[in-house]
């Protein structure tokens, strides 16, 4: 497609792929809050041979150029697992996605969105949701609040003006994903402390650290709880066994036993909380590359990270306990134990919980109870095709 001297082309070949990945550096060069991603990780998401998402999904990438210079990028993609979900859960038949959206100007942005929609329509899609890059488990949503904060590990950062551009293309917000920030050096309110202490007296409850030597078995327990806990949530898409193995391999270097807890009730695992040290603090200065000295620096850091921020990307309680007092008691206990270890062993002072769906009443109530506040909002938009 051409528009004046603007040309939109599908990405083909290595040079185009490199331009697609490198373009983010053009957009955010002067943004002090942007954290350059490791390029190897971006390729790990967008290349079919590296990402098991492609076993159930397909994607097409596009570049916008003006006078030979790249002025924007976008992905259009379809996930067969998304198509098989019940529509009342947000996804469902006919739903395609766009993602990896970046542009230097609105004209390029609008033309890219139009091209992505055209590709999705050609594949029989009747509705588009985005931005989601590539999966809801990777980087969902557009940052619409909190541009003055650097993103934590595995979270996106976007230009404030994209919000208006996406709305101008006919999109409406469908869901907000929130992240909550808290000062973890402060003790939790007395009521929460009493709930934790009462749980400690119960011989029914065990809160244990994960055992990294049994990594695969522990991952299977967490996944079982996650699928049960999140299975009816808005936007839920099952994670395949291959994806679990893939994510596990990626996360293993930043998995620390002190930071992931499994709660057992009468000996049965019923809840978990996963916390990751904010790797972005270590990689921000590497400018996207582990060479020549980045590897050594990162490996040194990973031996015993001292890190300001901890991110809680995932937490879940089995469905049969949800909305019970036991569910919140287990959650408060896991949060408190990890909080103590994050301070004493990692020197952390700040926590970030999320993302949390705007209508997840249980999780939002827990976040409020521990005196955390919303620091970022990511918005997902939709449009009929």
Image (cartoon, rainbow, N blue to C red):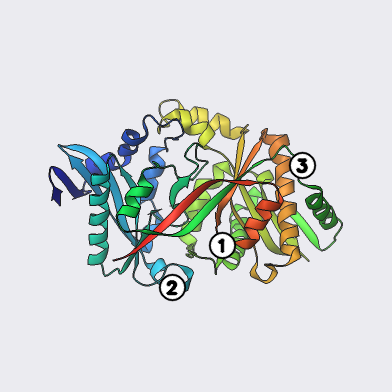
Q: Nearer the viewer, residue 143 or 338?
A: 143
Q: Residue at x 28, y 39 (%)?
A: 104
**Label 1 sits on residue:** 359
Q: Position of residue 121 (x, y in %)?
A: 25, 66
Nearer the viewer's eye, disc 3 or disc 1?
1
- The secondary element bearing badge 1 is classed as loop
- Secondary structure under tag 2 reads helix
Instruction: Identify the element where label 3 is drawn.
Output: loop
317 or 377: nearer the eye?
377
Residue 2 appearing in the image: yes
Q: CA distance from mark 1 to mark 2?
A: 17 Å
Mark 2 or mark 3: which comes first in sequence? 2
- Quarter occupied by residue 43: top left
Q: Quadrant of residue 83?
A: bottom left
Residue topped by disc 3: 187
Q: Which residue is mark 2?
A: 87
Which is nearer the eye, 206 or 24? Answer: 24
The residue depicted at 64 percent of the width and 69 percent of the height is 319
Q: Are marks 2 and 3 in contact (CB under 8 Å)?
A: no
């Amino acid at each position: 497609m051409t528009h004046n001297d603007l040309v939109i082309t599908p990405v083909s070949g290595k040079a185009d792929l490199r331009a697609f990945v490198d373009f983010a550096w053009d957009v955010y060069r002067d943004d002090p809050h942007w954290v350059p991603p490791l390029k190897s990780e971006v390729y790990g998401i967008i290349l079919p041979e590296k990402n098991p998402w492609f076993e159930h999904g397909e994607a097409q990438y596009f570049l916008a150029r003006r006078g030979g210079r790249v002025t924007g990028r976008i992905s259009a993609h379809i996930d067969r697992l998304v198509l098989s979900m019940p529509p009342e859960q947000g996804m469902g038949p006919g739903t395609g996605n766009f993602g990896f959206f970046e542009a230097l100007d609105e004209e390029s942005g609008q033309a890219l969105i139009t091209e992505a929609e055209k590709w999705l329509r050609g594949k029989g899609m009747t509705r588009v949701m985005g931005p989601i890059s590539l999966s809801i488990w990777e980087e969902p949503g557009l940052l619409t609040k909190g541009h003055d904060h650097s993103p934590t590990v595995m979270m996106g950062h976007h230009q404030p003006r994209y919000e208006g551009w996406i709305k101008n293309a006919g999109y409406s917000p469908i869901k907000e994903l929130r992240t909550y920030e808290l000062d973890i050096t402060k003790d939790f309110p007395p009521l929460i402390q009493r709930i934790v202490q009462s749980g400690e007296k119960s011989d029914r409850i065990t809160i244990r650290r994960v055992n990294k030597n049994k990594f695969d078995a522990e991952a299977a327990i967490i996944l079982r709880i996650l699928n049960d806990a999140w299975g009816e949530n808005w936007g839920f898409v099952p994670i395949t066994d291959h994806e679990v193995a893939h994510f596990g391999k990626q996360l293993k270097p930043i998995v620390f036993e002190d930071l992931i807890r499994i709660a057992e009730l009468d000996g049965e695992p019923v809840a978990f909380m996963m916390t990751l040290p904010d790797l972005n603090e270590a990689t921000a200065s590497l400018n996207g590359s582990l060479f020549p000295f980045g590897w050594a620096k990162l490996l040194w850091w990973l031996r015993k990270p001292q890190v300001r921020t901890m991110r809680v990307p995932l937490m879940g309680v089995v469905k049969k306990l949800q909305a019970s007092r036991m569910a919140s008691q287990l959650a408060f206990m896991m949060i408190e134990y990890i909080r103590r270890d994050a301070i004493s062993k990692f020197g952390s002072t700040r926590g970030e919980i999320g993302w949390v769906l705007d209508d997840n009443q249980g999780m939002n109530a827990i976040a409020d109870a521990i005196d955390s506040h919303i620091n970022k909002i990511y918005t997902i938009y939709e449009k009929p095709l």
